[in-house]
Amino acid sequence: MRQAGHIGFGIRPSARRRGLAAWALGRMVDEARGLGIDRVLLVCEAGNVASARTIERLGGVFEERRDTEHGPALHFWIPTGESGT
């Protein structure tokens, strides 16, 4: 979980810039809330500005930058609102 996060998403290049990533991530956060998870971890490549912005737009709070076997990664937490977060 600390390497890949709770949630992963990807949008094919021809479907980008339409709000699909934010919509899908929002639904996944809603699902986590329904399962009683109070916050979810998302990890993206350090150079993936679009994913980082999408995560932040959905309430993601930057935790840290980590070096991984696949290169630098950014870790964000999104509170689901379950426990007053």
Image (cartoon, rainbow, N blue to C red):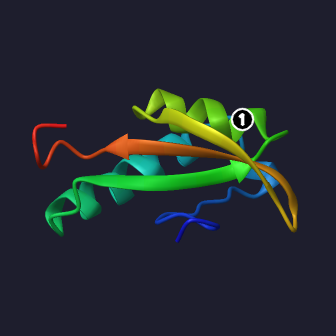
User: 49 or 3: which is nearer to us?
Assistant: 3
Q: Who's the residue at 51% across and 30% down the image?
A: 56
19 w.r.t. 73: above or below: above
Is 47 placed left or right of 83 in the picture? right
For label 1, count other residues whose C-alpha is less than 10 Å away and answer few (under 14), some (14-19) or many (20+): few
Position of residue 42 measured from the top left corner of the image (x, y, whole percent): 54, 53
User: 10 or 15: which is nearer to us?
Assistant: 10
Position of residue 63 measured from the top left corner of the image (x, y, whole percent): 54, 38
Q: Quadrant of residue 30?
A: bottom left
2 w.r.t. 67: above or below: below
Q: Who's the residue at 20% across and 57% down the image?
A: 33
Secondary structure of residue under mark 1:
helix
Count of number-bearing discs? 1
Position of residue 61 measured from the top left corner of the image (x, y, whole percent): 46, 32
Q: Who's the residue at 62% across and 54% down the image?
A: 43
Position of residue 27 measured from the top left corner of the image (x, y, whole percent): 34, 54
Which residue matches tag 1? 50
53 w.r.t. 45: above or below: above
**Callout 1 amino acid:** Ala
Q: Quadrant of residue 34?
A: bottom left
Is 48 placed left or right of 36 in the picture? right
Is 78 placed left or right of 3 in the picture? left
Q: Quadrant of the C terminus?
A: top left
Q: Who's the residue at 17% across and 42% down the image?
A: 81
User: 4 or 67: which is nearer to us?
Assistant: 67
